[in-house]
Image (cartoon, rainbow, N blue to C red):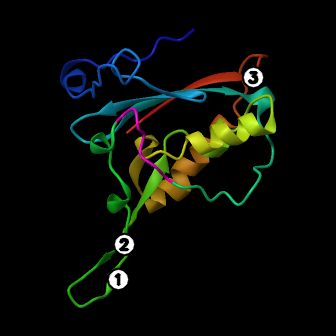
Amino acid sequence: TIALPQPKGALKKSLLRRPGKLREEIYSDHIHFTLVMDKDTRQLMYSAYNLDQNKLIKKVPGDGKRSWRKDGDIGAENQLGNDYYKDRTNREGEKIPNPYDKGHMVMRFNNMWGNTPAQVDKAGKATYTYANASLQHENLNRDEWRELELKIVREFRHGANGKLSIFTGS
């Protein structure tokens, strides 16, 4: 058992609290992971997830396209939505590409483990919530962050049991 981080000072003051909606008012629980939100930025403060490397699938089924949604327990008003990730149009009607990606803090690929294919698929789909995304510059998200997720998290082996607890934050 690993205790979850307890924010202090200014971070503690900006914790999103949802009495009656979230476990202990601050934890949004999902399959294999938990999210804690910042009420001021409406983004993830941190995620904590467990990974059983012995039950990981080696090849991700499907095309990888999933629908992003807002986390109902957190509340739509308490998280950023797709408007923050869309391209813009200037006054002349020209498209201005948005350089920010929805950076998964708990990566779908790393959350896809379980005892059955249905369980694995459900765990992967659970990561497609805006509460689990952080505004990440496309270069960071597609390069350095991706390398961390794939090379370190997926390939890290310490101890014999293959189980990891991972914390990410924005």
x, y percent for residue 2: 53, 11
Nearer to me, 73 or 124: 73
166 is within the stretch colored magenta: no
Amino acid residing under circle 2: Asp
Q: Is residue 131 something one can see in this rendering?
A: yes
Identity of the residue drawn at 28% across and 34% down: 38
Q: Quadrant of the N terminus?
A: top right
Disc number lying in front (3 or 2): 2
The rendered magenta stretch, by its main secondary structure, is classed as loop
Q: Are marks 1 and 2 in contact (CB under 8 Å)?
A: yes
Determine whether label 3 and label 2 are within 8 Å by CB.
no
Q: CA distance from mark 3 to mark 2?
A: 41 Å
Q: Which mark is residue 87?
A: 2
Disc 2: CA contacts within 10 A as few (<14), some (14-19) or many (>=20)? few
Q: Quadrant of the C terminus?
A: top left
* Position of 50 relative to 85 (above/below): above
Residue 83 picture location, percent across and down? 33, 61
The answer to which quarter of the image holds residue 39 is top left
Left or right position of 103 against 94: right
User: Which stretch is magenta?
Assistant: 68-74
Q: Which mark is residue 42?
A: none
Q: Earlier in the sequence, mark 3 or mark 1?
A: 1
- The one of 92 and 120 positioned closer to us in this rendering: 120
